[in-house]
Image (cartoon, coloured by chain):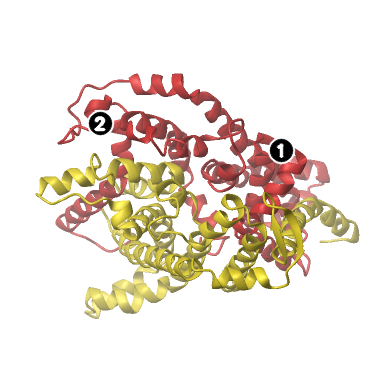
Amino acid sequence: MATKASRSAARLMMAPAVILLLGWMLVPLTMTLWFSFRRYLPLRGGDQGWTGFDNYVRFVTSSAFWPAVQATLVIVGGVLIITVCLGVLLAILLDQPMWGQGIVRVLVIAPFFVMPTVSALVWKNMFMDPVNGLFAHVWRFFGAEPLSWLSEASMPSIILIVSWQWLPFATLILLTAIQSLDSEQLEAAEMDGAPKLKQFWFIILPHLSRAITIVILIQTIFLLSIFAEIFVTTGGAFGTRTLTYLIFQRVLESQNVGLGSAGGVYAIILANIVALFLMRIVGKNLDN
Amino acid sequence: MARTVTARRKAINTAIAWTIGLLIFFPILWTILTSFKTEAEAIASPPSFLFFDWTLENYAVVQERSNYMRFLWNSVIIAVGSTILGIIIAVPAAWSMAFVPSKRTKDILLWMLSTKMLPAVGVLYPIYLIFIRMGILDSRAGLVVVLMLINLPIIVWMLYTYFKEIPGEILEAARMDGATLKSEILYVLTPMAIPGIASTVLLNIILAWNEAFWTLNLTAANAAPLTAFIASYSSPEGLFYAKLSAASTMAIAPILILGWFSQKQLVRGLTFGAVK
């Protein structure tokens, strides 16, 4: 049905989106690459010429680098484990027959719609505050000494906040996947006397594997760049400075653009490795 | 599900699911409840759950002290503006990819998706610099453009998956009946495309409303939307729990309501059609 005329019309219709995204990708990326090879301190002498790979070496050899890598891995890994495991269980639970299913689903999904600065601030002040926070009340009720959560247990606290935000996403996607499961398979297994645990392990989990992979990949990409949650709660203190936050501090707070840009290039490479796997799955799906 | 369950089983499911659901929802519920307390009651020990003197005072104070409406207005303009702009650019693109596919359509779609994966912090300084040079730092127009660009891949993808579902036979049938291209677009395609466009608009308003990297880094006093306004409560105003709660409730309420309508679209939009 596509004629020559409609093909050129199609190209014209696509042009604005393609050109804009191309510009959005290439212009800042080129600038970041350019800055990363220069000694560039806007407030202390400006652009001071080429430095080769100096920024790249200094970024990874600075004392802040490995702790930042560790913090990033702990947060991303911790949130992934919590959201995927609880997400699978919640999805199975929500798929069971019950009264008020629609309302429960709404309750579970709600945190995803809360803006990151609000959820970070509400958790920080109203739950984790060592004096007036709700956790402190509960701790005192049981006769325990309230913790100063965000400084004494900073990592678990951040992981809790971020998991709370992302659990709905995992649950919703896994629930959608579960609902496409052929219930006859489960019925057949039940008739053959397969126990629930075996049904879960051999039927439900394999059916979910693709959805789980997608959840892991998409969340990894978003979690690698979480920002507001740390900005509002600890400001990168108490061992919660992730790679994203370290780069942000280098670029905007200490205004060492060369060094920050080299870090940015590392972050881009890292995100692209994850993205490659995701694109494969999505691309395969397009063919069907 | 066709499996038969006893009423007892169903009751147990219901009890467990409601408990967990309320537990997950609790932080939001607690924020809403606290927003109706006085400051003294908000930090009372032990905290009262429902039995306190309900007051609307906090909402009035937040508006009075911080000019809340201005931040709200900035959020509305940025979220709605960037979505409309994105739709205008994305509809023709998604349309042509769905109805006049070529060998490269798949590559273009995947490439668009890859631009979404670019970590924002990696291009923070270039964008910051471009904004300063163009004099659009801390302006709503600048944020509209940036948020449109970061969400454009999602908009194109969602629209593409919706348009793809419009069956080609209908078009052929319309042509057989002698419909012109104009009436084909106006009377056949548009009605079928509108639900998809509406869902896309909804999800993107939510994403833009909650975006908290560019809105925090590219605004100051003038263009700051609600994300930045709430962040400014970090300290010491954050210690006024009731007011913090009132401000938070107002910031999330519109999106919570929109979000409830868009559960299904969320899955499609954020998994790029890989899970349906």
Which is more N-terminal, label 1 or label 2? 2
Looking at the colours in the rendered structure, which chain would you say is drawn in yellow?
A: A
Q: Residue B194 location in percent, x, y?
A: 63, 42
Q: Looking at the image, which residue sits at the far front?
A: A45
Q: Residue at x 25, y 31 (%)?
A: B42
Question: In the image, which disc is placed on residue B42?
Answer: 2
Question: Looking at the image, which is closer to me, B152 or A23?
Answer: A23
Chain B in the picture: what colour?
A: red
Residue B50 figure quarter = top left
Left or right of B228 in this view: B12: left
Q: How many angstroms separate mark 2 from mark 1 (CA)?
A: 41 Å
Q: Is residue B33 above or below residue B110?
A: above
Q: Is residue A249 above or below residue A79?
A: above
Q: Residue at x 38, y 35 (%)?
A: B236
Left or right of B167 in this view: B61: left
- Disc 1 residue crowd, few under 14, some 14–19, many 20+, Cα 10 Å: some
Q: Residue B103 location in percent, x, y?
A: 77, 70
Q: Looking at the image, which residue sits at the far right?
A: A5
Question: In the image, which disc is placed on residue B136?
Answer: 1
Left or right of B100 in this view: A124: left
Kindly check if marks 2 and 1 are in contact, taking CB atoms under 8 A apart as contact. no
